Amino acid sequence: MSTVLDQIEQQIAKLSTKAVKKNTGNIRTIADGVAKIDGLSDVMYNEMVAFPGGAIGIALNLEETEVGCVILGDVSKLKEGDEVTTTGKLLSVPVGKALLGRVVDALGNAVDGKGPIDAKETYPVERIAPGIMARKSVNQPLFTGIMAIDSMIPIGRGQRELIIGDRGTGKTTIAIDTIINQAKINKVGLASGDAKFRPVYSIYVAIGQKSSNIVRTVAALEAAGALEYTIIVAATAADNPANQYIAPYSGAAMGEWFMENGMDALIVYDDLSKHAVAYRQISLILKRPSGREAYPGDVFYLHSRLLERAARLDGKGSLTALPIIETLAGDVSAYIPTNVISITDGQIFLETDLFNQGIRPAVSVGLSVSRVGSSAQIKATKQVGGKLKGELAQFRELAAFAQFGSDLDAKTKAQLERGARIVELFKQPAFSPAAIELQVSILFAMQKGFFDPIDAKKVVAAAANMKNFFTTRKDALLTEIRNKAALDKDLEAKLQAACDEWKSGYTA
Ligand SMILES: Nc1ncnc2c1ncn2[C@@H]1O[C@H](COP(=O)(O)OP(=O)(O)O)[C@@H](O)[C@H]1O
Ligand SMILES: [Mg+2]
């Protein structure tokens, strides 16, 4: 008898009286990659939830009777009533160098057919941005390879510089050029054996773009030998809005890995206009209240918490961000453009008019600024390019005036002639970034008047010829400029001699 009682007592002791967490629920409604779920009473904000068939959701709206989730992955097989379970984990993505050279989706899964990615670590997609104390001021350059930008709107490591302009004004091209330039610098720097050299790794996040465009971008990077230093995170226009919403945060997490591990990285968000649209779509389905231009009120916070993650960390590395915004008819005062302008450290404004006139890259000198980058600019560029912005501004003013056909004095005429030549010198084809030492040499020649006797229409050809002359014949001089990063008397004399040599052999 007592043994039976003992057995019962033992059974009772084994019973767990702890309430079992309710961590399963069912889909109530599902549409456009957003599901409303009954019964997930224990879910955390931003927690991953698992759907049947491997799709992953993120809990965004926690309400009294239901949970609103966005779904990443294939939603086509999900239906009302399907069971959903919490995972207890925040969304995270693979990080590390194994991702370089690869194209991944918003969750970090390979989509390039090159097999699985052997990443050792994961980072959460959402992270609190570094505080002020952890940050260090921006004072190391990040060269875009685009003369108009490096000389007048310099960018530093850890900076956030917006690229803004209408569709088809060359925004993506500037970002890709910058990535290609990093790869070129990496190759030279790593080959030099300089222990202090810091390579820059790139992450290109494509948001809401056509697949064909992404394919073209990958091909351009590969052709330029830049893919091996680059991670591409792709959420195409065909992907559901949830993927487009998450992709930039996934990319940021991948960039943070480099920064946290003492390396430098560059991240391009192409583009945040489409990101905002994806977020608006999600929010409207979740029935969040909408505000200006029907965007939800927290769209500003959405972008600021993303861009705040770019930083230069004391004792660690840096993450430089180039967000892209597409404007309509050059309107920078629309809601999303003004938001992102206010969050970034400056903007590169591209003008449709300039682009159509053949002035490419179509950088507007007057409307573009870099608020922190000049402290990162090397001395040599300051020496040869310090006056450029003023000279160009003056040129624009005088050119408008000169249209009235009044007689011009010699000085004004000279200023106009010089300005016209600077505009020509800044023309640069797509995917051909110029090394900073080459930029310095060309600008030196310009300041010393070597292009003045050449017809303005022939300046592009002359500059191309000079670039070729320097790269093929003056390699030692270029290397010296790169290493010294400043022009002393000796280097100036050598540059002058090289320009004279070029001039004697060149006929326009
Ligand atoms: N510097 C340039 N020189 C010549 N063509 C360019 C230049 N920059 C861009 N383009 C061309 O202009 C078109 C639009 O450029 P893209 O970068 O895709 O613009 P966006 O991203 O602003 O829509 C592309 O065909 C591109 O090759
Ligand atoms: Mg583009």
Image (cartoon, rainbow, N blue to C red):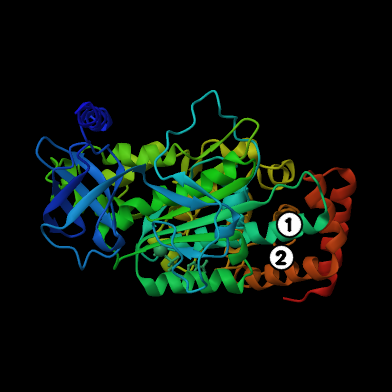
244 or 123, which lies in front? 123
**Amino acid residing under circle 2:** Pro
The image quadrant of residue 192 is: bottom right
The image shows residue 209 at horizontal and vertical percentages of 35, 65
The image quadrant of residue 148 is: bottom right
Q: Is residue 383 left or right of residue 396?
A: right
Height in image: 455 above or below 52?
Answer: below
**Amino acid residing under circle 1:** Gly
What residue is disc 2 on? Answer: 453
Q: Is mark 1 within 8 Å of ligand 1?
A: no
Q: In percent of the image, x 72 and y 52: which residue is there?
A: 447
496 or 137, which lies in front? 137
Q: Is residue 5 left or right of residue 110?
A: left
Assess disc 1: are there few (<14), some (14-19) or many (≥20) residues with their C-alpha within 10 Å of its C-alpha: few
Q: Secondary structure at mark 1?
A: loop
Which mark identifies residue 232? none
The quarter in which the C terminus is drawn is: bottom right
The image shows residue 336 at horizontal and vertical percentages of 29, 46
What residue is disc 1 on? Answer: 449
Q: In percent of the image, x 82 and y 68: which residue is there?
A: 502
Q: Secondary structure at mark 2?
A: loop
Q: Are marks 2 and 1 in contact (CB under 8 Å)?
A: yes
Assess disc 2: are there few (<14), some (14-19) or many (≥20) residues with their C-alpha within 10 Å of its C-alpha: few
Report the Cα–Cα distance between label 2 and label 1: 8 Å
Q: Which quarter is ligand 2 in?
A: bottom left
Height in image: 72 above or below 77?
Answer: above
